Amino acid sequence: MSAELYNLTLTTNFCTGMNFLQWYGPQRQLIITEPGLIKEILSNKDRAYPKAKAPNYVKQLLGDGLVTSEGEQWLKMRILANHAFHGGSLKNMIPAMIASSEIMLERWRHYESKEMDVFREFKVLTSEIISRTAFGSSYLEGQHIFDMLTRMAHIISGNNYRIRIPGIGNFFKTSDDIESENLEATIRSSFMNMMKKREQEAMLGNIDGYGHDFFGLLLEAYHDSDKTKKISVDDLIDECKTFYVGGQETTSSSLTWSVLLLAIHTD
Ligand code: HEM
C-alpha cells in the first residue's frame, strides 16, 4: 500500500472513531480511538498495559528517556518531568509561547488569500516553543541541537526498513551511518558545552540555582548529592532529546489537523 493510501485509510478510520486491527509489517496492531478505552489504557492503574518494546531506531534516537524507559529509571525521570509540567511551570512558559505564535502570525500576513503549508509552519513554531521553554537563555544552542536531531531522525527512520546483512555494519559503514554517528557525537559535545556554560553562570551567581527551565532542572538533578535522585549525563541528554522528539511531531500534527478541520468546516 502506498504511504498516501495508508495515511488516508488511517485518517478515515480515525475520523469514524472505530477500533480496528492493522498490520505494521509482520506485527499486528490494535488501533483504539474510543475515548473510554484510551483513558483506561493510558491511566494503566493495574499496570496491565506495559510499554511496547521500542524499535531499535527509536532507542537509537531517544536512548533511555521517559518514553522508552520503565521501572526505577522511569520513576526517577518522571518525578523530574512532573515539575516541568506543573501548573506553575506551565504558566511561566506562556509568554514564550505567545511571542513565538505572534511571530508566526506576522509571517502569515504575507500569505493572505494564498495557499500555504501549515504543517511546515507548525513544525517551526513547535520547535521554537520547545527550545524556548526547555532551554530558556540557552535557546539558540538548543535550537541548533534540535536541527541536528531532526536530521538524525530523518536518517535513522529512512534506514529503518532497509535490509542489511547482519554483522556487516561492523566492517562497512554507509554514508548515512557515518553522518548519523558524527551527528550523535556533535549533539553530545554541544550538550556538554551548554552544561558547562550554565554551570559557570550558576557559579558566578548570574542565575538562580541552575535556572528554572527544564534544562536547569535536569542540571540540578545531575549535581544532586543524593545518589537515589542523581541522574547521569546520558540521562540528561536522553531526556532533552525525548522532550523534543516527543513534543514536536505530536503537537505540530495535531495543530495541522485542527486547522484542516477548521478550514473544511468554516461555520
Ligand atoms: C498533541 C500532543 C501530544 C500527544 C497526542 C501525545 C501523546 C502521547 C502518548 C499517547 C504518550 C504515551 C506513550 C506510551 O506510554 O506508550 C505520551 C507520552 C509522553 N509524551 Fe506526549 N503527546 C503530546 C505532546 C507532548 C509534549 C508537548 C511533550 C513534551 C514537551 C510530550 C512528552 C511526552 C513524554 C515525556 C512522554 C512519556 C511519559 C511517561 O512515560 O511518563 N508529549 N505522549
Image (spheres, rainbow, N blue to C red):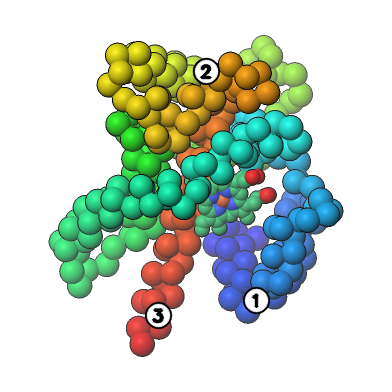
Dot 1 falls on a residue whose secondary structure is loop
Q: As drawn, is 115 to the left or to the right of 182?
A: left
Instruction: State which tag comes first along the sequence, 2 or 3.
Output: 2
Up the image or down, 79 lies above or below 179; here it is below
- Within-10-Å neighbours for mark 2: few <14, some 14–19, many 20+: some
Which is more foreground, mark 2 or mark 3?
A: 2
Residue type (three-letter) at the residue carrying disc 2: His
CA separation in Å, label 1 and label 2? 47 Å
Residues 46 and 63: in front is 46
On-image quarter of the C terminus: bottom left
Which is more foreground, mark 1 or mark 2?
A: 2
Instruction: State which tag comes first along the sequence, 1 or 2.
Output: 1
Residue occupying the far left of the picture: 110
CA separation in Å, label 3 and label 1? 18 Å
Residue type (three-letter) at the residue carrying disc 1: Gly
On-image quarter of the N terminus: bottom right
For the point 56% across and 29% down, the residue is 238
Residue located beneath label 1 in the image: 17
Residue type (three-letter) at the residue carrying disc 3: Ile
> Which of the 4 image quarters holds residue 202?
top left
For the point 74% across and 64% down, the residue is 40
Residue located beneath label 3 in the image: 264
Residue located beneath label 2 in the image: 223
Residues 215 and 87: in front is 87
| Residue 5 in view | no
Dot 3 falls on a residue whose secondary structure is helix
CA separation in Å, label 2 and label 3? 51 Å
